[in-house]
Amino acid sequence: MKKRILPLLLSLILLVSILAGCSRPADEGSKAPDGENNAEMNSPQEGENNADNTQPPEGTDGGGENQSPEENYDGKLVFDHSMELSYAKCFTIDYYKGGYKLATISDGTKLLTVPEGMSVPADVPEGTIVLQEPLGHILVSSAPVVSLISAVGALDAVSLTTNDVDTWYIDEVKDAINSGSLTYVGEYDAPDYEKITADGTRLAVYSAMLTEDVEAELKSLGVGVMVDRSSDEDHPLGRAEWIKFYGALLGREEAAQEVFSGQEAIINELSEVPSTGKSVAVFYITSSGSLYARKAGDYMAKMVELAGGVYVPGDVGVGESGTSKMEYEAFYDAAKDADYIIYVWSMGGKPETLEDFLGRADILSEFKAVKEGNVWCTTPDFFQIQATIGSMVNDIRLMLEADGTVDALTYLTKLK
């Protein structure tokens, strides 16, 4: 009997021990069962800044330990974004990873800027002008382009010009020529190629007056050649927005945007002012006696409209830019009743007085604007400065509102 009881007691003791072990709490730090809401285990430790438990570790991009290092874009053209333009239609600027920029002009010309220390990509489009940053040693044959580059504070990038010091009305440019940092290299159609070679010119910027022989010679010297197409823009602010083109080439985007925004603000403010209803004719007479009127689709006609005026003749060159040669009688019939005349001073003999102006043709004395003393002339720098078109439009507005005591504005002067 005793032999049977002892094994039973031992079995009972072993069963109690097993049951007691299963009922003990989990050891500190052990994993909670799946599905159990163990807030204490999921809470951050004291001193941890991880309130929402979603911040990536410092020094990573959110990929944790498997995050690959930043990709190297050297020698690659990986598109990033394009520059936003509001008015300009004749160029685009595309930005690529790593700092590459591709400028495309409406005539098909492409210019690629390569960041300093970076390689030229192998897949550059054929015929592209490749420019290594920082960009310098530029030949500029267009005065308005020089004014845009000067306005973004990059005039030191221009080393050669085809306009001599006596033809300039921009003080910064005249100072640069007089100091020797900017060199006159001859006329636009006959530049000094030896000086161009000695300068190490990398880019030549011309107006549409570029001749085929000059272009061919420059290219044979290894100089990239582009034609500034801002004159093809149909809106005044489109011409002014070309400052962004040169700002991008020269790494001065912020300065370019600031200048442009200031001029755009002037135009926007003028748009809120009612039209005056007063008509304005814009023309000039060459030294040979030919009369040219701005076309109705020209940017100067648009400037008159933006200023609150009505351009005449409004039926000549509709939708076209530039000027139209007109016979005196035809122009008289179209513009004789214009309230104001804006004479383009920079062409055709540059009249200093009303008498000089009337001496160009007897018929001019019959115009209403002449009889009422409303003949104004553009200042010498009017066509050299392109970065202040908004201010020029504002001057036209001030002209339309001026009383008899006002005879000089920033860009317009009354002929007396």
Image (cartoon, grey):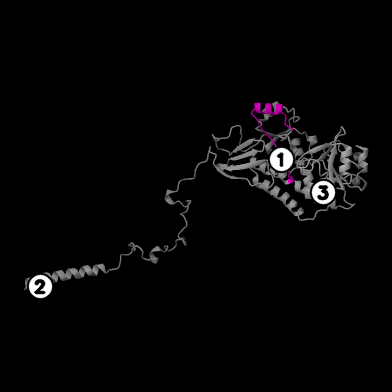
**Secondary element at image label 1:** helix
The structure residue drawn at horizontal position 36% and vertical position 65%, both measured from the top left corner, is 36
For mark 3, does the 10 Å Cα neighbourhood hold few (<14), some (14 to 19), or many (20 or more) residues?
A: many
Residue 211 lies in magenta, yes or no? yes
Query: Which mark is on residue 395?
Result: none
The residues bearing labels 1 and 2 have C-alpha atoms spaced at a distance of 113 Å
For mark 1, does the 10 Å Cα neighbourhood hold few (<14), some (14 to 19), or many (20 or more) residues?
A: many
Q: Choose the circle earlier in sequence order: 3 or 2.
A: 2
Quarter of the figure that contains the N terminus:
bottom left
Q: Note whether 230 is above or below 264 in the view shown.
A: above
Residue 392 in view of the camera: no
Query: Which mark is on residue 310?
Result: 3
Q: Nearer the viewer, mark 1 or mark 3?
A: 3
The reply to whether the C-beta atoms of the residues labelled 1 and 2 are less than 8 Å apart is: no
The residues bearing labels 3 and 2 have C-alpha atoms spaced at a distance of 124 Å
- For this orientation, the residue located farthest to the bottom is 1
